[in-house]
Every structure is written in structure tokens, then in C-alpha cells.
Amino acid sequence: MNPALDLTADADEVRPTEKIRCHGERYDAGGGGINVARFAQVLGVPSAAVFTTGGSTGARLAGLVATSGVRCTPIGIRGTTRENFTVNDRASGKQFRFVLAGPSLDDDEQTQCLAAVAQVAASARYIVASGSLPPGASPDFYQQVADVCAAAGVPLILDTSGGGLTHVTSGVFLLKPSLRELRECSGRTLGTEVEQVQAARELIDRGVAQTVLVSLGAHGALLVTASESIRFPAVRVAAVSGVGAGDAMVAGLTVGLVRGWGLTRCVQLGIAAATAKLQTPGTSAYESAEVQRYFAALSAEREFSIRNLR
């Protein structure tokens, strides 16, 4: 709903007030849903991306998506697609991410988006709704997406934050919040794993989602179902960029589901994809061989803990 043309560049040193000379710039198609579609495509699963597009920025974005091999369903809007800017400070090793709010959408444009989702749902195995909602979007827009998916009988995987998450009340097959997003949703600090599991279970008990997968960054992931919780460790690697790692996890997870795998194996593929993504610049896609290498290692180790919830 709120895609972006992602610009990534390096700077020798980021300093206040002074002009920061950047180099090594690259442009990628960005936005949660677009990233998931591109990353799933690399893993061999044909994907379609439904996204808004406006102005010259939107035209360039759509061109980049099409080049990746993903089938495009762009919805024209009156506003101009946003740009996001990431600067890698070589002196400190820190990454600075500048994210714009995006264009405002009116009611007619949102209706067009829902109609496009309904159209692709007719032939989809899964629908992934991912990313922030743009200004003007109805706070319950993702609930409307869930209703469309329910009517089509297609499982919905949702990865969003803020109002887009708190206004969802039902119909999600799998919800993938980060720990920060789960905290925002629950209104609690969730300092322990027990508290994190409890917060995820509350969403399941309320009927918001059947399953919750909490991404924990460097601490791995936490899968919570109606009967158990499973903690997965992360793979330790030197990160080039953290941009898009969560989207890579969703892509790997969804690819596993399309292949008919069990949830545990799907999450392992998601972690492998996220690990491979950490080692690529900007929002560029990973290599499939790298994902398979990490996945093989994770499958062999099987170092995760399972706790019964009842």
C-alpha cells in the first residue's frame, strides 16, 4: 500500500551540518509486499505484486519490479510514490535510514486496491499483506484485506505495524510482528519470553490470527500456536544491511508454506532467507544458493526449544 523507490548509498563519514558526499548509490524497488514478492521469486515461487504507483518515481519503481520477474498489478494514484534513503556511514559502521510518509490515498484509490487484491486472490495460494499504511488509508484497511481473503478462501499472512496492526480483529492465518510491534500492540514492555508468548497467545485467543511469528532480530524468532511455542535461534553473520531482512523472513516462510511444509521447517527457511538478506546491500535480493546453504545448516542443527502452552 505504501511502496517506495529505495536509494542506498555509502558515505565516508556522516557529520551534522556539513555536506555529506555519497557514493556507490543503488536503486531498488522497496516496500514490504514488493520485497516479499521479489524474494519469493528468487526462491522459485512465482509471485504477483499488487502496489500503488504514482508519478515518475512510481513509474521507475514499477519498472524495477517488472525487471525482477514478478508479475505486476500496479494501481495508479494521484500522488507521487515516495523515495526512501539509506546511508551507510563507513567511519562508524552505522546505518542511517530516512523514511518518508508517502502519498495520501483517497477512498476511491483504496477501493481499487481492494478490488485488485480480490482479483489476484482468485488464483493465489497465499496472500501476503506487508508494510505500513500510507496517509489517508483507513485504519482498518488490512482488516478489509483479511475479509477479502476470507471470502476468497485464501490464507492471509500479515506483516504490519501501528494502526494497521491494532485495527485488525480477525481473519489472519499468520501474523508476523517484530518484538517492537508486538509491544506496541500489547501496550506492555514484554521483557521476557514468557511475556512475549503470552502477548502472542492473546492475539490468537481473540481470533486475530491462527499463528503468530515474532521476529526477534539477532535473537532469532518465536513461533506461537494455539498449543505450543517454539524458539528459533538466529544465525550469527556480519551484516551488510538490515533493510528488508524481515521481508526476507516472510518470503522464505511463505515459500515453505506453498511447498506444503510444516511450520517449523517454514520458519527455518524464513530465518535462512533473512540471514542471506543481511549480507546484501540495500533492498537487493539474495542469491538462492546462499539461502539454501543456511537452510541446510539450520535443518541439521535443529537447535530450537518447544514448550507446550496448555
Image (tube, helix red, strand yellow):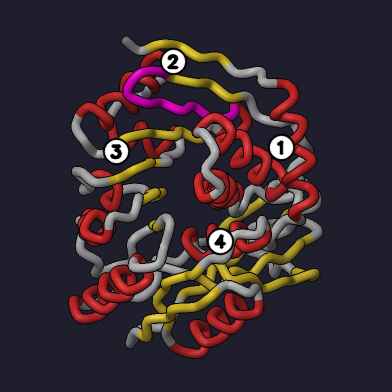
Secondary structure category for the residue under label 4: helix
Q: CA distance from mark 2 to mark 3?
A: 22 Å
**Residue 71 position (above or below residue 220):** below
Amino acid type, residue under disc 4 in the picture: Asn
Secondary structure category for the residue under label 3: strand
Query: In the image, is 267 to the left or to the right of 77?
Result: right
Which residue is tagged 2? Answer: 192
Query: In the image, is 7 to the left or to the right of 54?
Result: right
**Residue 119, horizontal then vertical, whole percent:** 32, 74
Q: CA distance from mark 4 to mark 1?
A: 20 Å
- Residue 75 visible, this orientation: yes
Query: Which stretch did the figure color magenta?
Result: 220-228
**Magenta-drawn stretch contains 20:** no
- Residue 130 visible, this orientation: no
Secondary structure category for the residue under label 2: loop
Q: Residue at x 37, y 71 (%)?
A: 120
Which residue is tagged 3? Answer: 209
Secondary structure category for the residue under label 1: helix
Q: CA distance from mark 3 to mark 4?
A: 23 Å
Which residue is tagged 1? Answer: 295
Quadrant, the N terminus: bottom left
In depth, the one of 189 and 210 nearer the eye is 210
Amino acid type, residue under disc 2 in the picture: Thr
